[in-house]
Image (cartoon, grey):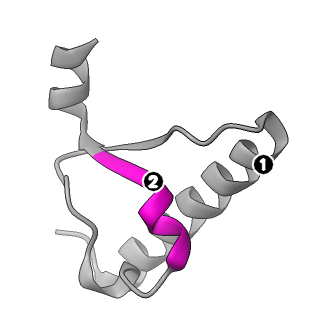
Amino acid sequence: MLPLFHMLDTYEREIKGLMRGAKEMRCSNLTLITFSEDTWPEFALDRPEISKIKLIPAWKWLLET
């Protein structure tokens, strides 16, 4: 299990990157592929932009594609 501060940094970096890329590409279908999580951690729930991002575990994404 990763320490909480590492998880915060990782999610922050990924959310910022997705939002910046979505703005530049004019894309609204956003998906963040995670190792195993399919729900947002408690500490990320206060961010309004997460409602635009779908979380999906890598194994599930691989089965769907």
Residue flagged by tag 2: what amino acid is it? Ile
Q: Residue drawn 46% across and 66% down?
A: 50
Q: Secondary structure at mark 1?
A: helix
Magenta: main secondary structure equals helix
**In the image, residue 20 lies at what x, y percent?**
75, 53
Q: Nearer the viewer, residue 30 or 4?
A: 30
Label 1 crowd bin: few (<14), some (14–19), many (20+), radius 10 Å = few
Q: Which mark is residue 23?
A: 1
- Whether residue 41 sits left or right of residue 20 in the image: it is left
Q: Residue drawn 26% across and 42% down?
A: 56
**In the image, residue 10 lies at what x, y percent?**
47, 65
Q: What range of the chain is rendered magenta?
A: 48-55
Provide the residue designation for mark 2.
53
Q: Nearer the viewer, residue 16 or 23?
A: 23
Label 2 crowd bin: few (<14), some (14–19), many (20+), radius 10 Å = some
Q: Secondary structure at mark 2?
A: strand
Q: Nearer the viewer, residue 62 or 45?
A: 45
> Looking at this rendering, what residue extends furthest in the right direction?
24
Q: Residue drawn 28% across and 68% down?
A: 40
Chain-order first, disc 2 or disc 1: 1
Residue 61 in the image: above or below residue 56: above
**In the image, residue 53 lies at what x, y percent?**
45, 53
Image quarter for residue 64?
Answer: top left
